[in-house]
Amino acid sequence: MQNLGNLKYVSSENDKALTCNKTQTNKTEVFEIIELKDGLVAFKGSNGKYLSSENGKKSHDLCKSKNW
């Protein structure tokens, strides 16, 4: 996933919080798209954890942009 506002990639390194500071992709910037019921999808990071937003709130401001 790339933030079109700053052209940085979202990264899921080990047990760290998501970051949005990578200029190139590597295995930690790859997310598996998992199809769920009713046309929904989930994103699973290379660290085995799923991308989430608790109660619809932004969980991280490092990737803040209007251009997603």
Image (cartoon, rainbow, N blue to C red):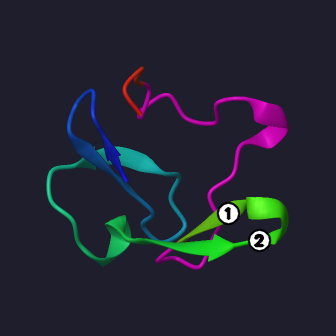
Name the side, left or right, on which 61 lies relative to 59.
Answer: left
Displayed quadrant of residue 44: bottom right
Residue 66 in magenta stretch: no
Q: Read off the residue under disc 2.
A: 36
Q: Which residues are magenta?
A: 45-64
Label 1 residue SS: strand
Name the side, left or right, on which 13 lies relative to 50.
Answer: left
- Numbered badge on residue 41: 1
- Numbered badge on residue 51: none
Find the residue positioned furthest to the left.
Answer: 24
From this view, report whether residue 1 is shown above or below residue 46. above
From this view, report whether residue 35 is shown above or below residue 52. below
Quadrant into which the N terminus falls: bottom left
Residue at position x 55%, y 35% from top?
60
Residue at position x 21%, y 65% from top?
25
Query: Residue 4 at what x, y percent from top left?
Result: 27, 34
Label 2 residue SS: loop
Query: Residue 7 at what x, y percent from top left?
Result: 20, 38
Displayed quadrant of residue 58: top right
Asked if marks 1 and 2 touch (Cβ < 8 Å), the reply is yes
Query: Residue 66 at what x, y percent from top left?
Result: 42, 20
Query: What amino acid type should be assigned to the residue bearing mark 2?
Result: Leu
Query: What amino acid type should be assigned to the residue bearing mark 1?
Result: Val
Q: In the image shown, does 35 or 31 lie closer to the viewer?
A: 35
State whether the magenta stretch is mostly helix, strand or loop. loop
Residue at position x 64%, y 36% from top?
59
Find the residue positioned furthest to the front.
Answer: 38
Quadrant into which the C terminus falls: top left
Q: CA distance from mark 1 to mark 2?
A: 5 Å
